[in-house]
Image (cartoon, helix red, strand yellow):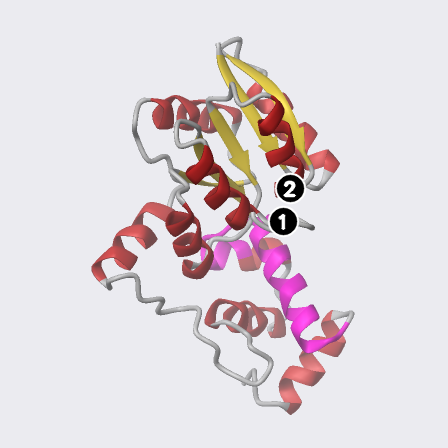
Amino acid sequence: MIRIAIAEDIDRLALALKNKIELSPDFEVKHMAKNGEELLELLNKDAVIDVILMDIQMPVMNGIEAAEKCSKRWPQIKVIMCTVFDDDEHLLQAIMAGAGGYLMKDESPAKIHKSIFEIIEGGLPMSAGIATRTLRLLKNGGKILDTQVVDDFQLTDREREVLQHLSTGLSYEQIADNLYISYGTVRKHIENIYRKLQVNSRTEALNKAGKNGLIG
């Protein structure tokens, strides 16, 4: 029996991940935490865990910081980041923090099961496309090429690309298809765009972006 811990602050996503994992009789979800700090508290009480599936963006203590602390204190526990972020910056941070795998949240149960077995056996499980990014990062010496700040609103290149697609009237699903990323990743990028532009709707975002030369 492989023992699993889940760190995810959104209840429905945590439950969905737990249900996917427990479709296999080989896995047992022992801990469920809403943030990194809560996860550390649970591990302090019971660290008999084989694999942690860790979200990145969580309150109190995010997944990157929690992964680093877990890797230092319990190096025998494997950490797989399970997130909506597919950009180089978060990927590099996760690797530097000691994560041994990187999956998107919308992966199938079969992919999640395979990834858990893979990391237990010493592999580096990753979602499609992430492995390519990792190799590119390594070839560039860890230099991030597509997430540099490009304007006063601190939009990354990927966020600006999503914004450009948004300006053409495409739906989230169409943007995801065009950029070869998941629907959830598009939503997260757009949430970040709204936050950075300090707007609450597509119309407001496009108006502000147009006035500031962010879209053409």
x%, y% of residue 99? 41, 41
The kind of residue tagged 2 is Glu
In this view of the protein, which residue sits in the foreground, 78 or 123?
78
Magenta stretch: includes residue 216: no
Binning the other alpha carbons within 10 Å of mark 1 as few (below 14), some (14 to 19) or many (20 upward) gives: some
**Which quadrant holds the C terminus?**
bottom right
x%, y% of residue 29? 60, 19
Q: Mark 1–mark 2 contact, CB under 8 Å?
A: yes
Q: Is residue 25 above or below residue 47?
A: above
Q: Secondary structure at mark 2?
A: helix
Instruction: Point out the residue furthest to the left here.
Output: 139
Res 72 → quadrant: top left
Q: Is residue 145 above or below residue 27?
A: below
Where does label 1 land, which residue?
Answer: 61
The kind of residue tagged 1 is Met
The residue range painted magenta reads: 176-199
x%, y% of residue 53? 53, 33
Residue that appears at 44% across and 69% down: 147
x%, y% of residue 182? 53, 48
Binning the other alpha carbons within 10 Å of mark 2 as few (below 14), some (14 to 19) or many (20 upward) gives: many
Q: Is residue 43 above or below residue 175?
A: above
Where does label 2 land, which residue?
Answer: 37
Res 32 → quadrant: top right
Q: Earlier in the sequence, mark 1 or mark 2?
A: 2
